Image (cartoon, grey):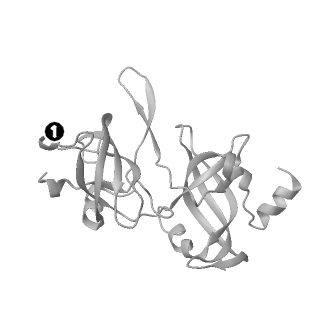
Amino acid sequence: MGLFKKAKGALGGVDQHLIETGVLARGNVKDVDTTSMSTGRAEQGLGARIVCKVTVEVVPLDGSDSYTAVCTHPVPQVYLPKLMERGAAVAVRVDPDDPQDIALDLEHEVPPAPILLRSDDGTSGVVTTNKGTYTYEEIIRDGRPCTVEVSAVFPLGQLTQAGLPASGLILQVHRDGAAPYQAQVGLHVPDELASVVVPGAQLPGKWLPGPGLPTDVNLVTIDFPALGG
């Protein structure tokens, strides 16, 4: 890392080249240490950008081992409370030549955590799903109504926390105040509703504003109780 780049990072400058060319990964926030510095003018609705030293667990999306890295980043003041919440996650960009060189990508949706699945014959693969920050029951209880369109359903080869067979689903989420977006989730589909949860079906759902910025797109599920399941 060059001297100029080091100085820029220390002052909370954003490495736009790294944002544009770095490898996307999930960053589980471990610590946020605010400094007395701020950058630029206060933005309408966002407040000043506070320079923070942010420690994250970098979770590569290819299923390779996670690790801890630190960066200095100007964070809009309005985002700080969510960034400091337990279980907060952000999108990060990683320099492929230096995994410790990272930048927060606050404009990108938080990518889902990868889950490595191993079959009985010893082969393995990576499937990205929402990995249990909140339970299905919590999302149904505390979530807000939405409509989900099923794009794909496939077996995950693993069990839910309740010990039931889990299916992977790719959903198109339609909710008030947001453009449609894609979510990838893993959940148990009741046997009596298997003929309903098929590609092309539009079903009632629930989404939960989560710790990601602005939200973790995978905190969504099918509202089986509304379907009688």
Give the residue drawn at x 32%, y 36%.
158
Instruction: Give the side of residue 148 with respect to residue 74, left or right.
Output: left
Q: Tell me where residue 142 sits by quadrant.
A: bottom left
Is the residue 186 above or below the residue 92 in the image?
above
Q: How many marks?
A: 1
Where disc 1 sits, the SS reads loop
Instruction: Give the side of residue 213 with respect to residue 226, left or right.
Output: right
Give the residue drawn at x 53%, y 69%.
84
> How far across and how far down the image is residue 159, in percent?
29, 40
Is the residue 85 above or below the residue 122 in the image?
below
Badge 1 crowding class, 10 Å Cα cut-off, few under 14, some 14 to 19, many 20 or more, is few
> How far across and how far down the image is residue 55, in percent?
63, 60
Instruction: Give the side of residue 42 with respect to residue 218, left or right.
Output: right
As drawn, the residue found furthest toward the top would be 121
Q: Nearer the viewer, residue 116 or 195?
A: 195
As drawn, the residue found furthest toward the right would be 3
> How far across and how far down the image is residue 16, in percent?
72, 56
Residue type, mark 1 in image: Ser
Give the residue drawn at x 69%, y 59%.
71
> What residue is pinned by disc 1?
195
> How far across and how far down the image is residue 219, in percent?
37, 57
Is the residue 124 above or below the residue 67 in the image?
above
Give the residue drawn at x 61%, y 57%.
105
Q: Nearer the viewer, residue 222 or 9?
A: 222
Is the residue 187 above or below the residue 45 in the image?
above
Instruction: Give the side of residue 186 with respect to residue 62, left or right.
Output: left
